[in-house]
Amino acid sequence: MRTLRIVYAVLVYAFLYLPLAVMVAYSFNASRFSMAWKGVTLEWYVKLFANAGLMQAAWHSLLIAILAATCSSILGTLIAMALHRWRFPSRKVIHTSLFVMMMSPDIVIGISLLVLFMAVSLPLGFWTLLMAHVTLCVPFVAITVYGRLLGFDPHVVEAARDLGAGEYEVFRHVVLPLVFPAVLAGWFLSFTLSIDDVIISFFTTGPTFEVLPLRIYSMVRLGLKPEVNALCAIMILITVVAVLLSQRFLKEKQ
């Protein structure tokens, strides 16, 4: 039985991660036009960093991801605290809508935001893309922080108030330190969602502001190049680091 479980686990992990491992391996393949292994080289990474268009798209993606993660962390934390602390008529509606946004297909969100931006005559570009990514990420931060708020003892807040702490002191010295791991985890999760989003970015950005996932998509349509493998390998590394950090901060403090 133990051997069967090991074989099953190996097959599952191979199915999930073997394609990624193959792509990373071929980013070091010296062959440019065939899948035959011709040796190990770093040439494609050198050419990748020498490509001005790709580097500009990478900078755009990094900028949007950082700003979207920061804005989402602030808004999501405020929403979670409001849902946890106050009881108001639309509380359940807001709570349910967060899950609706999380479960909605990206293409539905992208088209809906595109219609909204067109209705208000807002030109597509940096700001529309940023708002779209914030819309995508806020529910994930709010649910993560809300779960953390449900887990700590409310008597700690009451004790702080009994000792004379005002609303700001309670938030600054009691609530924020308790939820900060969840806020940070939400930030990393938002960063990961933003930096590799394709569908929503396709509908909400303009020709003057190109991001990396769309640039990769346009390059792959013309044929798979070794530079794309190298670029995807770097994105996988960034994503893995962000996910590991988010998981690290989600753990309960001893």
Image: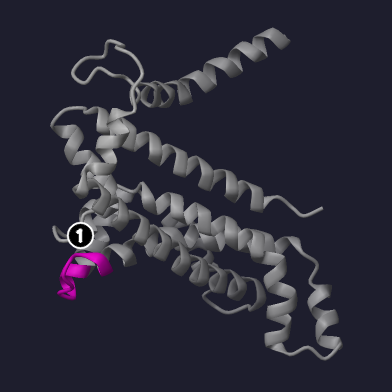
The relative height of residue 165 versus residue 179 in the rendered view (above or below) is below
Where is residue 151? Give x, y as percent: 74, 60
Extent of the magenta region: 117-127
The residue shown at (82%, 82%) is 160
Is residue 116 shown in magenta? no
Q: Quadrant of residue 130?
A: bottom left
Q: Mark yes or no: residue 243 visible.
A: yes
The relative height of residue 175 versus residue 13 in the rendered view (above or below) is below
Q: Amino acid at mark 1?
A: Phe
Q: How is the image coloured?
A: one colour
Q: Which residue is mark 1?
A: 209
In which quadrant will I find the N terminus? top right
The residue shown at (22%, 39%) is 217
The residue shown at (70%, 50%) is 251
Instruction: Report the label total.
Output: 1
Q: Mark yes or no: residue 103 visible.
A: no
The relative height of residue 21 versus residue 75 in the rendered view (above or below) is above
